[in-house]
Amino acid sequence: MEERRSPSPCSSRPSSPVTPPCEMLGPVGIEAVLDQLRIKAMKTGFEFNIMVVGQSGLGKSTMVNTLFKSKVWQSSLPNLEVPMPQTLELHSMTHVIEEKGLKLKLTVTDTPGFGDQINNDKCWDPILSYINQQYEQYLQEELLITRQRHIPDTRVHCCVYFVPPTGHCLRPLDIEFLRRLCRTVNVVPVIARADSLTIEERDAFRSRIQQNLKTHCIDVYPQKCFDEDVNDRLLNSKIREQIPFAVVGADREHLVNGRCVLGRKTKWGIIEVENMAHCEFLLLRDLLIRSHLQDLKDITHNVHYENYRVLRLNESHLLPRGPGWVNLAPASPGQLVSAGPGKARKRATKDSREDEY
């Protein structure tokens, strides 16, 4: 007797092994649904929230400007008269970027002061607190009896972590940060200012970082268990082999062989940002914008936010009460079990698709 294979717990696509596909006698116009979704997306636009984390001087602001080819973030020049902040401060800035009629509401959160102190003990706590605050705001909006038609989404969809180009391995600070943040948000590590390393040093540094991630069980994005089919597995496997990307940021154009290119001018030539022979910026841009932007949002909603939501609803008797709030009964002992990431993603997929459009 042939054994029936059960669907993967990490898959978010509903499977129907019992119901066979219906044989159609002719087209009915189902493909027009794609046009409807496109028209609606053109009207409403998209939201994308990104956080950049790293020590000062690693080019975080320049990298964000390079990614979106806009002056999204104005980098501040160091001032010797202004003392360095003693605590980590989070700053957010929102812009609307329009391309070919499609609007993207982009929110960038910077973390000046991270890792700059002598004592960096628990310097990740303000970042974790900020991420959870955005989940809490979204949850409170969902719990209202009369909800908004479109709940503002301020949840962090991706955290780009800038690793200093030491050429050795991950520092204890890097390991502790990544180990904690990967449970709460999608984290994409990059090697900052990669032009300070030779190609051989860069490849060796990447190998040591990958080994560090494997040794400490740090699962950065794209997570292997969320590959939904063969095509996803092939694409994401190539990405995982290249992570962390070695990147260089630049927001100025230079003339090279009669063409204008984004790059950094040095004494020995121009480092072209969009040249794969010079750095891997194109891989990072393709991951964040061109191929995985929607997947980053889906995993944020179906996995990270869902896990937070389950834990909070299990503590429903502690939720604040006020006008317009749902009176939730205390959770029973059998409910106090955190859903796994795969189940969370599968359960929330339908709601996610409705919320995105």
Image (cartoon, rainbow, N blue to C red):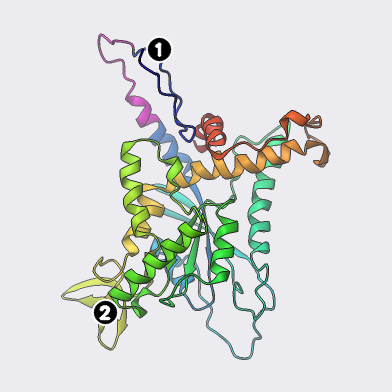
Identity of the amino acid at label 2?
Ile
Identity of the amino acid at label 1?
Thr
> Any magenta on residue 31?
yes
Identify the image quadrant of residue 30. top left
Pointers 2 and 1 in contact (CB under 8 A)? no
For label 2, count other residues whose C-alpha is less than 10 Å away and answer few (under 14), some (14-19) or many (20+): some
Q: List the residue tagged with mark 1.
A: 19
Residues in magenta? 22-36
> Any magenta on residue 139?
no
Q: Which residue lies at the image location 41% right of the left edge and 61% below the top edge?
A: 210
Q: Say whether residue 330 is visible.
A: yes
The x and y percentages for residue 159 are 52, 58
Q: Which residue lies at the image location 58% right of the left edge and 45% below the top edge?
A: 304
The x and y percentages for residue 246 are 36, 68
Q: Is residue 102 above or below residue 281?
A: above
Q: Is residue 36 above or below residue 275?
A: above
Q: List the residue tagged with mark 2.
A: 270
Residue farthest left in this picture: 257
For the image, the number of numbered tags is 2
For label 1, count other residues whose C-alpha is less than 10 Å away and answer few (under 14), some (14-19) or many (20+): few
Q: Say whether residue 151 is visible.
A: no
